[in-house]
Amino acid sequence: MPSARSRALAVLRVRSRALAAVLLPTAVAVVLVTARMTGRLAGDPWPAVTLAVCAVAALVLLAGGIFGAVVLRASPAVTPTVPLPEAAAPDLYRLVRDLADRMGVPAPSAIALTPDCDSWLEDRSHGAHRRRGISTGPESEPGAAPVLVIGSPFLWWMRVAELRALLAPVVAGTGPSAHPDIADARGFLRGLDAAVDVGGRPGLGWLVARPARLLLRLCGADAAEMERGVAAAASDRAQGVDQGTRTVAQEQVGLAYAGWDRLLTRVALPAWRMGRWPAHLDAGVVSALTELSRRDRLADGFASRLGERPACDLLEQPGLIDEAASLLAARLFHGGPAEAGPDWSPVDWAAYPEEVVDRKWRTEAARLHAALDALSVPSAAPPDRPATPGTASDSARPPKPTPAMATTARAEAAPAPGVGARAQAAPAASGTVQPSAPAPLMAPAASGATEPAATAAGRPSGRGTAQASAHTGAPADPRGLAAAQPPDAFGGPTLERVLGYLTDPTGGGAAGEALAGRLSGDLAREERTADTHKARPGRGADTLPLFPLQPPRSGRDLLADHVTALVCCAAVDSAGAGPGLDWLDGPVLLVGGERRADLAPRVLSLVEDGDPEPLRDWLAELGVRPEKPVRLV
């Protein structure tokens, strides 16, 4: 604590020196004017010197006044959170107040939840927050204690005793926060940070942003040491509170972070891209971590804790809080709307396979065939082409469909009520918008039938393909299949069309490169079009998403994903397979209720080496008919 206070005083000394630098020209001007009035500085050049110094002092004083007003009035950044009033969690407030009383520190003024695996204290008593309506409760009063922000995954995964031990050093931080010098230094730093953001506006950069950045650099080392001293003092104060349980709780933090990251990137992100947001991410993280504990021997035994009382029991309505936190997670990590709507509706875990996984596969399959149309690739092999070994024909025996389940066995083992629900932002709208009914499955046309008129009419000639490719920036058809092959042999989009195009006996992969380039361009255009419909602030800390989860994907990765989606669609339509959900890996293909994890290497063999035989053997084993048209979105 003495170290933290000394560092806070060092920060305040920087502020005092900046104020002195602003007032120095004015002091010199006052001395010169006084000397002139008393006759001590008579004659040239003192009149001109006095006038120049007074002008400089006026300009510096004006600029300093504007800068000081911006620093005092600018609104510091506030983390988007889900407010948790005391009526919604009286037991949680009671637990936090008991911790504060045991450690002899002020209790936090309020509690809020964030869709992240972290907890901290946040001051929301700045006057700008009250003026803008950001803070309206007791936490907005001058001199109020900071707000305790808790990561919502902790409430669903941790037990009550573990949460108490985890929050003890965080709550202990309210003691140093109440110290006048530390509070004053933190307020000055937050004002400078807000001034940097305000200085990004046209015309204010040189006057506000640059001085603020300079002062932040001068204060940086002392500010960091001050925060370390505050954390050390809080940790020392919390040493006597549940020390044994705290070690176990810290282990749970790492496990929760791993499961939360997998849930967001593998499960939630595909749904967000489809315009749906999982309504119970916190419940999902419990299932994901339980599955992780079964797979990873390092996590062995963690799932046995689930028999104890979960921390989410401290909430009055955990389901509603979970929905709000899940919506906020979609807004922070994907940039989705703040409220549910027709194009941004919630989805339950039970409906996830049909409403997200199946729709994702068919959307990607449609994009793949659209890219082939742009490259003028025929819909299937020519009629006189001999049947490829391993490919079912129309005269072959019909496949034996196997019963498909809607989700994996892990998804069926949903957590018990009150043992999971996760991040959302704003309160969800009542009612889930159901997707429209799927289009009827297309029946295979007879051999030699022509492609539907809409598709055939929209296909350019071979020379037009080169011109269109130059226009769009996508690679042209490298093998000239448009001119070398006759019209379609089968009606509608088929897997055989993709297999034939990507087959490359030389292993050069030129066709794959062309198709991957086309897919990359189409997807980039779709994303730009979607971004134009999102109402996002475009400046400073308000820009959304704050933490985007979409890593850049190469063209080959996109092509492999789209081919995999088309294969899954064909398996669902002709072999009785079904979409499923794996809590750690996201969308999966189920055959007979069991996950098939052996598809990826066969798709890579086709995409990277141009070798279709491993994939054809896999399709023949399942009874998938590549020449049969698939249903697209």
Image (tube, rainbow, N blue to C red):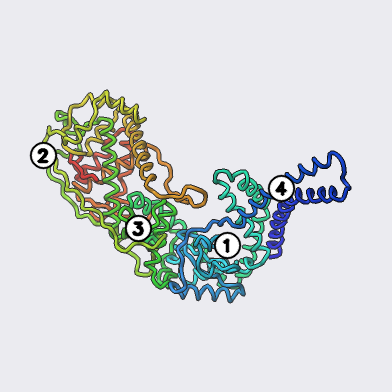
N-term-proximal mark, 4 vs 3: 4
Three-letter code for the amino acid on which mark 1 is drawn: His
Task: Give the quarter of the image for residue 498.
Answer: top left
The residue that label 2 is drawn on is 395
The residue that label 4 is drawn on is 58
Q: Is mark 1 on a helix, strand or loop?
A: loop
Q: What element carries label 4?
A: helix
User: Who is closer to the viewer here, 191 or 280?
Assistant: 191
CB under 8 Å between callouts 3 and 1? no
Front: mark 2 or 3: 3
Three-letter code for the amino acid on which mark 2 is drawn: Ser
Query: Would residue 128 be seen by someone viewing this image from the given angle?
Result: yes
Q: Residues within 10 Å of mark 3 (few under 14, many from 20)?
A: many
Three-letter code for the amino acid on which mark 4 is drawn: Ala
Query: Would residue 293 be seen by someone viewing this image from the given angle?
Result: no
Three-letter code for the amino acid on which mark 3 is drawn: Ala
N-term-proximal mark, 2 vs 3: 3
Which disc number belongs to residue 126? 1
N-term-proximal mark, 3 vs 1: 1
The answer to whether 294 appears left or right of 488 in the picture is right
Q: Is mark 3 on a helix, strand or loop?
A: loop
CB under 8 Å between callouts 4 and 3? no
Q: Is residue 503 above or below residue 30?
A: above
Q: Where is residue 338 in the image (x, y as percent from the top left)?
A: 40, 56
Q: In this view, does 596 lie above or below 462?
A: below
Distance between the alpha carbons at the discs numbered 2 and 4? 94 Å
Front: mark 2 or 4: 4
Residue at 32% x, 60% y: name it: 410
Front: mark 3 or 1: 1
Distance between the alpha carbons at the discs numbered 2 and 1? 76 Å
N-term-proximal mark, 2 vs 1: 1
The residue that label 3 is drawn on is 340
